[in-house]
């Protein structure tokens, strides 16, 4: 049900973009509250679906924010963080478009250092009127150019094959001078001001040339990054990032049940209710100033999540409740769910361990009954101890494969094929599972 609700919300955003501009403004996103114990996949559902649609996604724990006037971050900073993520995402896409061009430019710069070209300046020869022997000089220049081009292309081939990676040459970089460290204390939106001031002062301080020796391998990375920066228009990147943050951005607010107070007039409850009031205009729709430009939050999708074990969504202030019209309850994972988690995902937990050990030349295989036994153990431990959901599988797998992971580098050839079956799982875990006190600490 949670996957369905998030998928519908994302699809509605696509449908909205096909409407007339006038109607687009009126179609607001249907924000979602996911309720369920830890480890049932609340965050993972939103993260994976946002990755599928290439949407900027930012996950934040609401407990790091406090009401203005209390120690903590201002809630508007989550919009700034989302915009920064969108900028990085768009920049990566633009980088992919110019990467080949930047690589060729970086190669040319390296070849200019390794194979400098000394040739005649024909323009100055003509200016000086040195006509005597000019044709011969020009012919010689053409021959030299042909030889230089051939040598340059041969060296380019060696460069691409990595044969020149260990060679070094001097590189002059322009590093900014030391900038005094300062912090700014103030009202809302001031938590990023110190970073911006440092950047501004850094631009004012004259950059001092610094010469150092770098290898060709390091030069490839440095020069390509510099060429990419030259080819990318950051103003276009910022404008596109702001548009994406506004139209397709997703902010996942975790632990929202932690800002549900008991209604007291003192203590932490005051700040908790203040966070709800501060969060309300962000969710409702406002404009937040960022270093990349103003960002409107009217069409950002907010997905909140919480266990709500000691409270319920109706304990939130009424205005905030109305901004999260869709509520989905997730139940504890069953034995069947654990089995699917272990085997069905492309990069499932069992496959991760198989591939990790394959790097050591060890072939690891899990039988079906072993997977069923691991799932059964995870379900039992979650019932008898704290329910930590799918995270229980990580502790079980580490305990199960502890000896194999430790001994893998030194295993003899005849022991490098390992099969994990139900009997081995039970034998490895049963004593710990049976001892409840030990299980609390080890599993």
Image: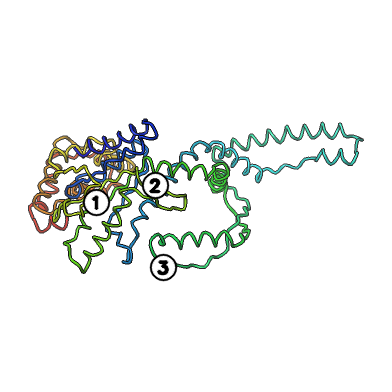
Position of the N terminus, as image quadrant, is top left
Q: For residue 126, which quarter of the picture?
A: top right
Rendered image coloring scheme? rainbow
Q: For mark 2, what is the residue? A: 296
Label 1's element? helix
Q: Observer-nearest residue: 412 or 31?
A: 31
Residue tagged 3: 185
**As rendered, which of 126 and 181 lies closer to the eye?**
181
Answer whether residue 165 is visible to the viewer in this image. no
In the image, taking residue 353 as reference, residue 18 lies left or right, namely: right
191 sits to left or right of 107: left
* Relative height, residue 19 to residue 323 (above, below): above
Q: Secondary structure at mark 3?
A: loop
Front-most of residues 353 and 290: 290
> Of label 1 and label 3, which has the lower sequence position?
3
Locate residue 45: give its quadrant: top left
- Callout 2: helix, strand or loop? strand
Which one is in front, 436 or 121? 121
Q: CA distance from mark 1 to mark 3?
A: 29 Å
Q: Position of residue 223 (x, y in %)?
A: 57, 46
In terms of sequence position, does the residue under pointer 2 or pointer 3 come before the other? Answer: 3
Residue 67 in the image: state x and y as whole percent.
30, 62
The dot on residue 332 is none
Q: Residues within 10 Å of mark 2 (few under 14, many from 20)?
A: some
Q: Residue 63: image x %, image y %?
A: 27, 58
Q: Residue 365: image x %, image y %?
A: 23, 37
Residue at 86 percent of width and 32 percent of height: 136
Q: Label 1 to label 2, Cα distance in Å?
A: 18 Å
Crowd tier of the residue under label 3, counting other residues whose Cα lies within 10 Å: few below 14, some 14–19, many 20 or above:
few
Q: Which residue is mark 1?
A: 320
| Tag nearer the camera, 2 or 3 | 2
């Amino acid at each position: 049900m949670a996957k369905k609700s998030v998928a519908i919300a994302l699809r509605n955003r696509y449908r909205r973009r096909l409407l007339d501009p006038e109607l687009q403004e009126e179609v607001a996103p249907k924000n979602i509250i996911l309720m369920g114990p830890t480890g049932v996949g609340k965050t993972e559902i939103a993260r994976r679906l946002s990755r599928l649609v290439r949407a900027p996604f930012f996950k934040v724990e609401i407990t790091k924010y406090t009401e203005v006037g209390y120690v903590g971050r201002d809630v508007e900073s989550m919009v700034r963080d989302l915009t920064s993520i969108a900028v990085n995402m768009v920049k990566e896409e633009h980088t992919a478009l110019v990467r080949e061009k930047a690589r060729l430019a970086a190669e040319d710069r390296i070849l200019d250092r390794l194979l400098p070209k000394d040739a005649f300046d024909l323009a100055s020869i003509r200016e000086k009127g040195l006509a005597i022997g000019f044709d011969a000089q020009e012919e010689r220049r053409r021959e030299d150019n042909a030889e230089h081009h051939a040598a340059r292309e041969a060296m380019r081939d060696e460069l691409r094959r990595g044969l020149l990676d260990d060679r070094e040459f001097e590189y002059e970089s322009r590093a900014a001078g030391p900038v005094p460290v300062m912090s700014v204390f103030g009202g809302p939106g001031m938590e990023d001001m110190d970073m911006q001031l440092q950047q501004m002062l850094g631009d004012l301080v004259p950059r001092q040339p610094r010469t150092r020796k770098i290898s060709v391998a390091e030069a490839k990375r440095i020069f390509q990054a510099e060429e990419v920066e030259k080819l990318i228009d950051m103003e276009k990147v910022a404008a596109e990032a702001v548009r994406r943050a506004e139209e397709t951005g997703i902010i996942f607010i975790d632990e929202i049940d932690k800002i549900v107070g008991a209604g007291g007039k003192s203590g932490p409850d005051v700040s908790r209710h203040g966070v709800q009031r501060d969060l309300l205009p962000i969710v409702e729709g406002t404009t937040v100033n960022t270093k990349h430009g103003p960002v409107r939050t009217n069409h950002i999708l907010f997905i909140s999540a919480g266990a709500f074990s000691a409270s319920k969504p109706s304990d939130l202030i009424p205005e905030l409740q109305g901004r999260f019209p869709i509520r989905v309850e997730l139940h504890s994972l069953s034995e069947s769910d654990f089995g699917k988690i272990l085997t069905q995902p492309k990069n499932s937990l069992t496959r991760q361990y198989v591939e990790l050990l394959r790097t050591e030349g060890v072939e690891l295989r899990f039988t079906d009954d072993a997977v069923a036994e691991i799932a059964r153990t995870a379900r039992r431990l979650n019932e008898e101890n704290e329910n930590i959901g799918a995270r229980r599988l990580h502790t079980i797998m580490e305990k199960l494969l502890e000896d194999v992971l430790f001994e893998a580098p030194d295993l003899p050839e005849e022991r490098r094929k390992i099969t994990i079956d139900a009997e081995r799982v039970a034998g490895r875990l049963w004593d710990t599972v049976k001892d409840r006190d030990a299980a609390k600490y080890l599993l």
